[in-house]
Image: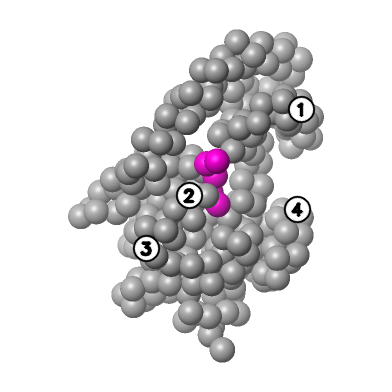
Amino acid sequence: MPADIRLISTDFDGTIHEDFAHAPVPEAFQNRVAALQARGVIWVINTGRDLASLMESIGRAHMRVLPDFAVTVEREIYRHVRGHYEAVEPWHTNCIRAHTGLFSDYAGELAELFSMLEAKYDATFYNDSWSPVCVIARTNGQMDAIQQELDTFCAAVPDLAPVRNDVYLRLSHRRYSKGTALQEIQRLLELRPEQTFAAGDHLNDLPMLRREVAHWLVTPYNGLPRVKAQVEGEGGFLALQSCAAGVLEGLDRFGVS
């Protein structure tokens, strides 16, 4: 029996978008999403990018379809309203307040952590509007070592968590993730996990790739081993094709045409 899916959440990079492909977001995927949206299905792009970066990539990919919601930097929620995106309140204000308070409470310790990591590793360290410690490692192996240090640090700070995507990492409040943001959208739309499809390929997607968040789970062929293991363990589908083709394969598997 086809799944009664009313909400679709997809990661962007590596899940539906390929930077150097001839068509970064394939026409077949766009056509499927457009048809689903016409029937009232809500589409969310759930990404680690900030909103400006996401909008630029959507433009460069010449996408004809736009998401109904965008979750950006793994935690902010924006809703498409008459051609532009508006922050969803009170989530947005509460999210900013939680992060500002957390980073302020541990400002001294975070500054020491930043200095220690910068002295120890030949990686790029910086801070931005979303995190007092951001990292771009030279390799995934180097990021593994850096993440170990951050995991140890965060274990002593109950609300602090490292959020990683490939060789990129930032810090975040544990209450705010791709998973909790998707649950907030469900609450706003009065939808349930049983009506929700989620697809992702990387570590920052793990919070939404759980049956308590979305019952219909997919990772494309290019998904990381840890992501595939979680999706399989949650009863989801491991696609045989990469990126958007794999997401389409998953939609077909669950009877969503």
Measured Cα–Cα span from mark 2 to mark 4:
22 Å
Q: Which residue is painted at 64% across and 52% down in the image?
A: 206
Among the two numbered marks 1 and 4 on one chain, the one whose residue lies closer to the N terminus: 1
Q: Amino acid at mark 3?
A: Leu
Q: Which residue is painted at 48% across and 23% down in the image?
A: 101
| In the image, residue 47 above or below residue 3 | above
Residue at which label 3 appears:
189
Among the two numbered marks 3 and 4 on one chain, the one whose residue lies closer to the N terminus: 3
Measured Cα–Cα span from mark 3 to mark 2:
13 Å
| In the image, residue 85 above or below residue 251 | above
Q: Is residue 47 magenta?
A: no
Q: Which residue is painted at 60% across and 62% down in the image?
A: 212
Is 150 displayed left or right of 100 in the figure? right
Among the two numbered marks 2 and 4 on one chain, the one whose residue lies closer to the N terminus: 2
Residue at which label 4 appears:
226
Which residues fall within the magenta stretch? 175-179
Tag nearer the camera, 1 or 4: 1
Measured Cα–Cα span from mark 1 to mark 4:
20 Å
Tag nearer the camera, 2 or 4: 2
Contact, mark 1 vs mark 4 (Cβ under 8 Å): no
Contact, mark 2 vs mark 4 (Cβ under 8 Å): no
| 252 or 176, nearer to the observer | 176
Residue at which label 2 appears:
181
Residue at which label 1 appears:
152
User: Which type of secondary structure does the marked residue at label 1 adopt?
Assistant: helix
Specify the quadrant that holds the N terminus. Answer: bottom right
